[in-house]
Each structure stands twice: as C-alpha cells, then as structure tokens.
Amino acid sequence: DAKTTQPPSMDCAEGRAANLPCNHSTISGNEYVYWYRQIHSQGPQYIIHGLKNNETNEMASLIITEDRKSSTLILPHATLRDTAVYYCIAPNYGGSQGNLIFGKGTKLSVKP
Amino acid sequence: NAGVTQTPKFQVLKTGQSMTLQCAQDMNHEYMSWYRQDPGMGLRLIHYSVGAGITDQGEVPNGYNVSRSTTEDFPLRLLSAAPSQTSVYFCASSTRPNSIKNTEAFFGQGTRLTVV
C-alpha cells in the first residue's frame, strides 16, 4: 500500500465544514484513495473513493491534488454524529492483493 | 440483506482455550478478511480470502487459523487463546479488490474478546 499520513486529531464546530487532509506522496498510478470512518468502535464504514478526479456523494466530497500526492475529505456540514476516526487508505493491487491496510487515522471531534 | 454478521458479539475465554469466531455475508462477495483492533489502534489484518478454498495470511496471522469452504462463511479460529489476543475482531467482505472498479468493503459489528 502507498503510505498515507494523517493528523492524529482535529476539531470542527457543528454545522461547519470539516476538511480532513491525507498525504500519500508515494501513491502509484493505479492506486485509488479510499476513505472509511469508524464511529465509536463500530465496524468501519465506507465513505468515498477516487483516483484522479474530485468525487462527491451523499456523505462527503473528495478533493485529490493534480499530482495525486495528497487529498482532502470534506464533510460539508458536520454534525455531532460525524464524530469518528477517519481513515485514508490507498490499497496496492499488486503484492498486497488490494487489502485495506489501516493506519491510526484522524480522530475528528465535532463540537456543539 | 443482513450484510456481514459476526457471532458472538462478546466472549470471555480462559488462557489456553480454543474457540471459533463466526462471520457470514449474504452479498455473494468473493473477498473476505479478518482484522483485530487493539485499544487506541487502527485495524490490523489477520487473514484474508479471495474466494472459496483460498486463504492467505495478513499482517498478524500467528495464533489464528481460517478456512473458506463456502462463499458465505469465513470463520476465524483461535487455537490456544492468550491474553495478548484480547481485542475487538472485525470481519469484512467485498467484491475482489482490483484497480478497475470500486470495491467498497462492508464490515461486521465486531466481536469483543477477552482472554483471562
């Protein structure tokens, strides 16, 4: 897997946009960037993924830089229920079979 | 659809006991995997399977066995439980990971295991 680097924690005010950064400077051409989150020790939940272009779904937006060395997950209007650990992952489809290798992620705290 | 179902939700074992954690999915997914999560840590891959009859080791396979006799089921066996195996165990399933299409993984709700 491409190594990803995320800040250990972030705070966000309720109703504001939460912007979670991820560095993946060693990513290769066929490695997608995936985002998952884990709410209070539940099983991780898929959020969004992308390769080159920016992506948006009902949960979030994903902005990937043109050189693909970093990305930002955007929760446009954070709520208290978005408090969770967010994981940025770039599976390698060669040696690791595309396994999801989790780092420590970013603990996002949404505050009233 | 039930998704990914793990049983039991909680378990306490004595050191040296063996047990099997069950995982079943009803989405006809080829790929299944087991992770463990220790307090304050990310998930670590134990074993995975890309289809019935095929399994392979992940990052931390020692002390665990798996088998995949059907597409739906992927049990994890603890051979001789040790206190170091106290953890939360998550099972996941997805279509087979590849670089062409999205392979969203679905996770179970976890089994909380304590070994005393």
Image: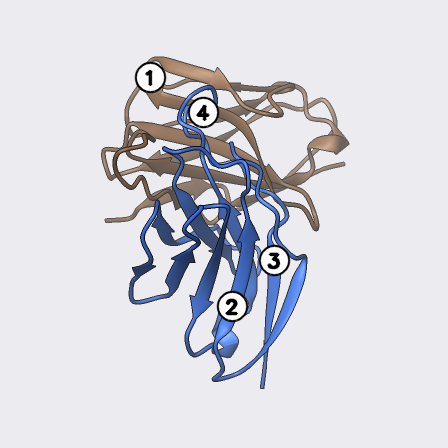
Mark 3 or mark 2, which has the lower sequence index?
A: 2
Give coordinates of residue A103: x percent, y percent.
60, 43
Identify the disc placed on residue A61.
none
CA distance for labels 3 and 4: 25 Å
**Amino acid type of the residue that numbered disc 2 sits on in the rendered structure:** Asn
In the shown orientation, is residue A49 left or right of residue A41? left
In space, the residues marked 4 and 2 are separated at their CA atoms by 32 Å
In the rendering, what colour is chain B? brown
Q: Residues within 10 Å of mark 2 (few under 14, many from 20)?
A: many
Instruction: Write down the chain letter for disc 1.
Output: B
Whether labels 4 and 2 share one chain: no
Q: Colour of chain A?
A: blue
Residues tagged 4 and 1 counted as in contact (Cβ below 8 A): no
Reading the image, the residue beneath label 2 is A19
Amino acid type for the residue under numbered disc 1: Ser
Horizontal and vertical percent for residue A22? 55, 53
Numbered disc 4: secondary structure: strand
Q: Nearer the viewer, residue A82 or B62?
A: A82
| Circle 4 or circle 2, nearest the eye | 2
Does dot 2 land on a helix, a strand or a loop?
A: strand
* Cβ atoms under marks 1 and 2 closer than 8 Å: no
Identify the disc placed on residue B69. Answer: 1
Q: Which residue is mark 3?
A: A106
Residue at left offset 61%, top offset 47%: A5
Query: Which structural element holds mark 3?
Result: strand
| Type of amino acid under label 3 | Thr
Which residue lies under the disc numbered 4? Answer: B48
